[in-house]
Image (cartoon, helix red, strand yellow):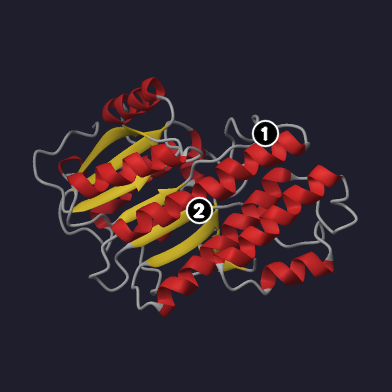
Amino acid sequence: MPLSTSLLKPTRIAAVTGANKGIGLAIVRQLALRYPSSPLNNGPLLIYLTARDRTRGEEAVRKLETEEGGGFVKKADGAHDLVSVQFHELDIAERESVRKFADFLRREHPEGIDIVVNNAGVAMTGFDTTVVTETLRCNYYGTLDATRQFLPLIRNDHNGEGRLVNVSSMSGHLNSKYSPAVRERFLNTQTVADITTLMEEFADAVKKGDYREKGWPGAAYAVSKSGITGMTRAIALEQQRNGSKTLINSCCPGYVATDMTRGGGVKTPDEGAQTPVLLALGDIQKRSGLFWQDERPVEW
């Protein structure tokens, strides 16, 4: 039974970035499947499926509206009356695009939204100054900008019902690819500015050609994901200090077979969507500022 467009005014609003294929599309699907039985269900849910390309994004919505069964998790009876999906164009690497979508959400939903899953990102081949610049521009700075723009729109009048999830990766784990000194600096960060300084130093070291001597790996994607994990933790701490009840976490979906992994991976996209969707909908005991994998918090 396919998704149908609900005629009822939605009481919950969600947005997923980078959602026309792969893990992002699976996250939209799994939000639709799991919402009816989730503790956040208080009426119809509207999900904005966002992507850079309008044609591909609209095709993805049509696929969700017509597919049978819904993938990894079967729909419960009556789910289709609760969930609708709409496309909206969004490129997180372009600040104007992020601003326009935030303005749209603010105008269309002045009472606020409930869930944001920042999934959009790039994984470029090779390693040079251009690859580092473009990877950080989208993965780190784009996700940071989207987080800053969308977070104030999330309703903060319920205890732990507002959710923001940034999709990171275990490739950003602070393991032996970093020198002990760089790893310690990551672990000691307290603010977004601290993390941004590290991203700037990495880009500068690559430009100068001495990144290895300074303790950095030759891996733009991995460093950008370390940045996302650290930035998400810093924003969660900042929001907690300000009294916010929104739960803000980052996660690794696992090694998923998508275009980004170029055919590799041991999980399907729907399996990879389980942890992001848990953080978006599940009872996570009000935990915030953590890095999750396989549906549980893990060490960064």
- The residue type indicated by label 1 comes to Met
Q: Residue at x 48, y 45 (%)?
A: 119
Give whichever of 100, 3 is nearer the camera: 100
Counting from the top left corner in percent of width and height, residue 76 is at 24, 46
Q: Nearer the viewer, residue 179 or 238?
A: 238
39 vs 74: above or below: below
- Which quadrant would the C terminus be assigned to in this image? bottom right
Residue 170 percent location from the top left of the image: 65, 54
On screen, residue 273 versus residue 299, left or right, reads left
Disc 1 residue crowd, few under 14, some 14–19, many 20+, Cα 10 Å? some
Question: Is 36 drawn above or below residue 128 in the view shown?
Answer: below
Q: Are marks 1 and 2 in contact (CB under 8 Å)?
A: no
| Quarter occupied by residue 242 | bottom left
Residue 134 location, quadrant: top right
Instruction: Check disc 1 and report the residue beneath it.
Output: 124
Residue 144 is labelled as 2
State which tag comes first along the sequence, 1 or 2: 1
Q: Position of residue 32 (x, y in %)?
A: 30, 44
Distance from disc 1 to disc 2, alpha carbons, whole Å, reads 19 Å
Residue found at x 33% / y 60%: 152
Image position of 185 with respect to 165: above or below: below
Looking at the rendered structure, the kind of residue marked 2 is: Leu
Q: Is residue 292 above or below residue 71?
A: below
